[in-house]
Amino acid sequence: MSVSFFFKVILVLLLLFIIFNLGRALWSMVRGDSSVPMSRFLGRRVLFSALVVILLLLVLALGIISPNPRPY
């Protein structure tokens, strides 16, 4: 298994976790549940979004993945 594939799997799992936390925040907002604040789920979403961006920049800098040279 290559490092590039491993990174892509990690990235997809992080993105799924971000969507899951966004859904939990929506569910908390709709139900009006005050036992767990909605900001906890939104904060996790922001934290993991920042982690995804940092990981992408790190992997690009290390040369593990390469950007598309012609984006259009």
Image (spheres, rainbow, N blue to C red):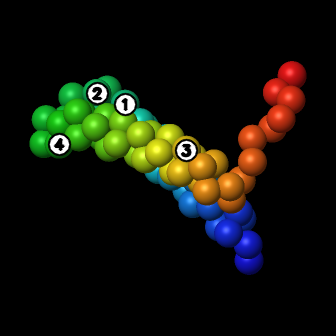
Which amino acid, mark 4?
Val
Q: Earlier in the sequence, mark 4 or mark 2?
A: 2
Residue found at x 70% / y 63%: 4
Q: CA distance from mark 3 to mark 1?
A: 30 Å
Q: Disc number at residue 26? A: 1
Q: Is residue 18 visible?
A: no
Percent across and percent down for residue 58 are 53, 51
Against 16, is 26 above or below? above
Q: Is residue 70 left or right of residue 58?
A: right
Which amino acid, mark 3?
Leu
Q: Secondary structure at mark 4?
A: loop
Quadrant occupied by the C terminus: top right
What residue does disc 2 label? 29
Q: Earlier in the sequence, mark 3 or mark 2?
A: 2
Q: CA distance from mark 1 to mark 2?
A: 5 Å
Q: How many marks?
A: 4
Q: Between tags 3 and 2, which lies in front?
A: 3
What residue does disc 4 label? 36
Q: Secondary structure at mark 3?
A: helix
Percent across and percent down for residue 20 are 45, 45
Q: Secondary structure at mark 1?
A: helix
Percent across and percent down for residue 22 are 41, 36
Locate residue 41: give its quadrant: top left
Marks 1 and 4 close (CB-CB < 8 Å)? no
What residue does disc 3 label? 57
